[in-house]
Image (tube, rainbow, N blue to C red):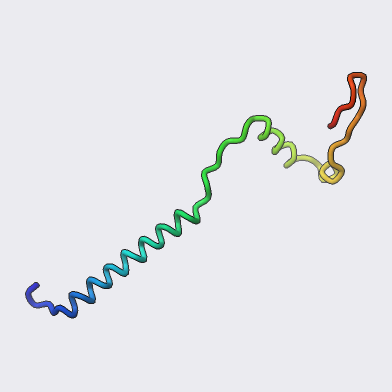
């Protein structure tokens, strides 16, 4: 370390440590903020979700309707 002062060496070292600490904190924040991996839905749940997305608003407000057939009551 010819030609450098101890004071400047210490300041440079502290700046490097602060930069690494900042990088580590930013990395942890990105990992924590990342959304969880989406798991595929079972087929029946996916079909139900799609049906709800495209259902007319009048059906959503009423909810399920029950009807009676020759085989007994059903819910639609």
The residue that appears at 85% across and 31% down in the rendered structure is 75
Q: Nearer the viewer, residue 54 or 22?
A: 22
In this picture, is 26 found above or below 41? Answer: below
Q: Position of residue 34 (x, y in %)?
A: 49, 52
The residue that appears at 64% across and 30% down in the rendered structure is 43
Q: Is residue 34 left or right of residue 45?
A: left
In this picture, is 51 found above or below 6? Answer: above
Res 17 quadrant in image? bottom left
Q: Nearer the viewer, residue 56 or 61?
A: 61
Q: Position of residue 16 (x, y in %)?
A: 26, 68
Q: Position of residue 3 (x, y in %)?
A: 8, 77
Count the marks: 0
Of the 4 image quadrants, the one containing the N terminus is bottom left
The residue that appears at 36% across and 60% down in the rendered structure is 24
Question: Looking at this rendering, what residue extends furthest in the left direction?
Answer: 2
Res 31 quadrant in image? bottom left
Question: Looking at this rendering, what residue extends furthest in the top direction?
Answer: 70
Q: Nearer the viewer, residue 56 or 19?
A: 19
Q: Is residue 51 left or right of residue 39?
A: right
Question: Looking at this rendering, what residue extends furthest in the front direction?
Answer: 72
The residue that appears at 53% across and 50% down in the rendered structure is 35
Q: Position of residue 49 (x, y in %)?
A: 70, 38
In this picture, is 63 found above or below 4? Answer: above
Of the 4 image quadrants, the one containing the C terminus is top right
């Amino acid at each position: 370390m010819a030609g450098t002062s101890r004071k400047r060496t210490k300041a440079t070292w502290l700046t490097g440590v602060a930069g690494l600490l900042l990088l580590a904190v930013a990395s942890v924040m990105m990992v924590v903020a990342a959304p969880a991996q989406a798991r595929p839905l079972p087929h029946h749940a996916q079909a139900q979700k799609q049906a709800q997305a495209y259902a007319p608003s009048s059906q959503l407000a009423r909810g399920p309707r029950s009807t009676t057939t020759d085989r007994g009551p059903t819910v639609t």
